[in-house]
Amino acid sequence: MEKFIIEGGKPLKGEIRVSGSKNATLPILAATLLTDGVCEIRNIPKLRDTLTMCKLLRSLGKTVEIGPNKVVISGSTNNHVADYKLVSTMRGSFCVLGPLLAKLGKAKVSMPGGCVIGVRPIDLHMKGIMALGVKADFDAGYVIATASKLKGAQMYLGGTFGSSVLATANVMMAASLAHGETIIESAACEPEIEDLGNFLSGMGAKIEGHGTPRIVINGVRKLNGISYKMGSDRIEAGTFLILAAAAKTDILVKDAHYNHLLALVDKLQSIGVDVQKDGADIRVRCKKTLKPGNIVTHPHPGFPTDLQAQYMALMAITPGVSIITDRVFPDRFMHIAELNRMGAQIRRDAGVAIVEGIKQLYGAPVMASDLRASAALVIAGLVAKGKTEIYRIYHLDRGYEDLDGKLTGIGAKVYREKE
């Protein structure tokens, strides 16, 4: 395994480019199981998760050719078993369930894995696909599902903590080849669902309302191949906006969708950060001491849970008291202990984190617990005094393409070493 070594306090400035969306790439790759046609997907980020999904597609019968920032997928889906060794490493791979059922009428998919950020049940996935006529059971850590014929249905997919992106994606893909009309109420509204809907529509699916709480799908008999360009990663873009604010600098974040980040932009502006749309980019200017600011995470268009840890790192160096509440993953606070190792003053009280901002963090050896916690530690390390060593950076490689290279390009001193 490798670790990051960061020499903090270096002045940062310049341009940093956002890669293609990880959270949209995974279901879109899964959607290629629905067709025997050739699918060329461009602007694919080179990440551990995308490579894992490509391995999974190969295991299911597809031919996958990986090129610079693109993937070409062809061939027939001929295996219905999604193996534990692949699915257990990445929760997003569970979205092969819907396509396998639609294409083959059966699926055996391992229960999902991924980052340890709290309980993430699959009840909404099962509720959605069973509404389409699927019979499902559990055996030895696998979901065993069959369907002689998928039939459209009306369903409500709201859950205890809101809608589910992957459950919505699974139902959308399965319903695209189902007989009749499917209506998903309380569907996830995230841009990644909109991206998936656009991809499926390009393949010949009949979908309306993707990106809204009500999605209507009229099933078709066949889907075709497609050439498609992925949108940019809003969470990576948001991470860079927060980094610019923490470093008190001027950074142009290239290929960033301003409209996908309105909740974050609004919060940053309210605490004193200058954030402006600049064509297809976002410019962040921050030269002054910021004000503390509370956040509560919600499903899109609310403040993203995937930016909660990074925002906490910013509040750790913002004098005053900030309260951070995560309504999506209430236990997603494992980064608190590691930020406190760097001098932060953060305590958890039931479902909230109370941050007493200080002026300066200090470098220390820290352990990454999950993908977004890793990003928070990188931000903290870049603005801390002294050297920070971040262990288990394989989490970062799951969701940030060439992060150390991008940061070096704006003046950071960060490099990798073997642990």
Image (cartoon, rainbow, N blue to C red):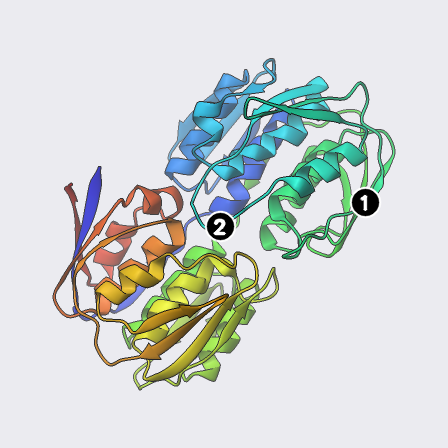
Residue 112 percent location from the top left of the image: 52, 34
Is residue 178 rendered to the left or right of residue 375? Answer: right
Q: Residue furthest front?
A: 350
Res. 230 visible in picture? no
Please indicate whether residue 172 sits to the left or right of residue 228 in the image: right
- Tell me which residue sits at (45%, 26%) in the image: 86
Q: Compared with residue 375, is residue 265 higher up or lower down, i.e. above or below?
A: below
Q: Quadrant of the N terminus?
A: top left
Q: What is the C-alpha distance between the residues marked 1 and 2?
A: 26 Å
Q: Residues within 10 Å of mark 2 (few under 14, many from 20)?
A: few
Residue type of the residue flagged with mark 1 = Met
Numbered label attached to residue 118 = 2
Identity of the residue drawn at 80% across and 29% down:
178
Tell me if residue 303 can be seen: yes
Pick the residue in front: 283 or 211: 211
Residue indicated by mark 1: 155
The residue closer to the viewer here, 201 or 386, is: 386
Residue 29 located left or right of residue 396: right
Residue 187 spot, x, y in % from top left? 72, 51
For residue 374, above or below residue 140: below
* Relative height, residue 214 to residue 309 (above, below): above
Q: Find residue 122 and report its image quarter.
A: top right
- Going from the N terminus, do you reach mark 1 or mark 2 first? 2
Q: Quadrant of residue 260?
A: bottom right
Circle 2 — which element?
Answer: loop
- The amino acid marked with disc number 2 is Gly
Position of 296 with respect to 253 (left or right) is right
Q: Nearer the viewer, mark 1 or mark 2?
A: 2
